[in-house]
Image: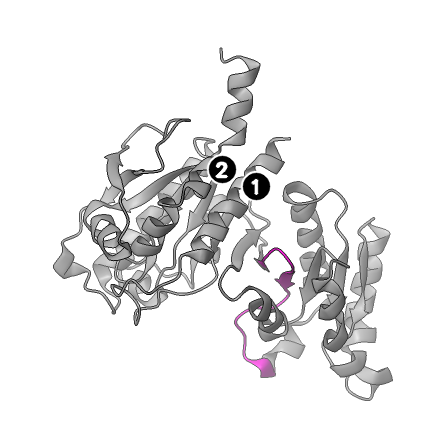
Amino acid sequence: MDGPEEQESILDKPVIAVTMGDPCGIGPEIIAAALADPAITVLCRPLVLGDRGAMERGIAVAGVKLAIASAPDLLPPLDASPHTLYLRELSRLKLDEIPYGAPTTAGGDACYRYICEAARLCLDGTVQAMATAPINKESMNSAGHDYPGHTELLAELTGTPEVVMMLAGERLRVTLVTIHEPLSRVPELITFDRVLSTIRITHDALSRWFCRAPRLAVLALNPHCGEGGMFGDEESRIIAPAVAAAREAGIDAAGPVSADTLFHFAAKGGYDAVVCMYHDQGLIPLKLLHFDDGVNVTLGLPIIRTSVDHGTAYNLAGTGKASAESMKAALVMAARMAQQGCR
């Protein structure tokens, strides 16, 4: 049996399964660039789930010095070299099947397998978290895997009925009641149950992975909180009762609060997260502060999943111009969450 010092060192350097994402996009090259940074391997032991040919191409594009070590069954060692990329090969793609800049069926099927394996490794405790590079929904669907994206697939794989998207950086965290919906539909989708569920999942996840007593702000839907009903009544009819129910359950939630002023105080540390009613309400301020280093976190899952806060960037794929900062931030956040969960 390992001694206390060895056990502590294992907890301090969790194994993170890194899914390669769409091989036709920037995933392989930003993973290579991120893993070549010694600051990442100080915090965690990355295990890439992907394709050797695509990763070799990504390493060349990123212009970094990394040797690939195959890890079909083994995990990266505690003293893993920052110059070694540990790869579990789950596909053997021909490069003419995965040209840069456009989705392919072969790439979509490979993406699906990387995600499924990462979820399995997290669920059985082999790895402590997963961090995902971007995928293309069209290519995955063309391969017969009909999911809108990572979130829905992971919810099914883990048997999770309710999940919440959180976008986060060092200065601001936002969660969303509605995500990719037409603005015209948002008011009908804002229900008491949905608002309360988002508050609860946000509180529970932050309590487990980030801070013990999170302070939440819950935004209004309408300008000036509806101005006494002049601009809408969702605040008094739906959002305020949901906040009251959350507070009765012991959750430190304030609201509804006007979005036009709240973010000033949240960015200064007044709140640990902001519950937003719709996509752009939360993502505009988040990306203003964290355009390069924002992280997408799926809350409510029984596993830790972080992701880059951007897409496949086909226009940049193969150019070496793609930023790896969001990939680095996703790995750092996954490692910190794993360490917090171990305590």
Q: Position of residue 271 (x, y in %)?
A: 75, 58
Residue marked by disc 2:
43
Residue 240: horizontal and vertical position, in percent?
82, 68
Q: For the residue marked with disc 1, what is the amino acid? A: Arg
Q: Which mark is residue 336?
A: 1
- Judged left or right of residue 284, residue 273 is right
Q: Residues within 10 Å of mark 1 (few under 14, many from 20)?
A: some
Rendered location of residue 128, percent (x, y): 49, 36
How was the colour assigned to the protein in this rendering?
A: one colour
Q: Residue at x 81, y 53 (%)?
A: 252
Taking the spot 50% from the left edge, 26% from the top edge, the residue there is 10
Q: Quadrant of the C terminus?
A: top right
Mark 2 surroundings: few (<14), some (14-19) or many (≥20) residues within 10 A: some
Residue 153 appears in view: no
Distance in Å between CA atoms under marks 2 and 1: 8 Å
**In the visual, does 46 lie left or right of 282?**
left
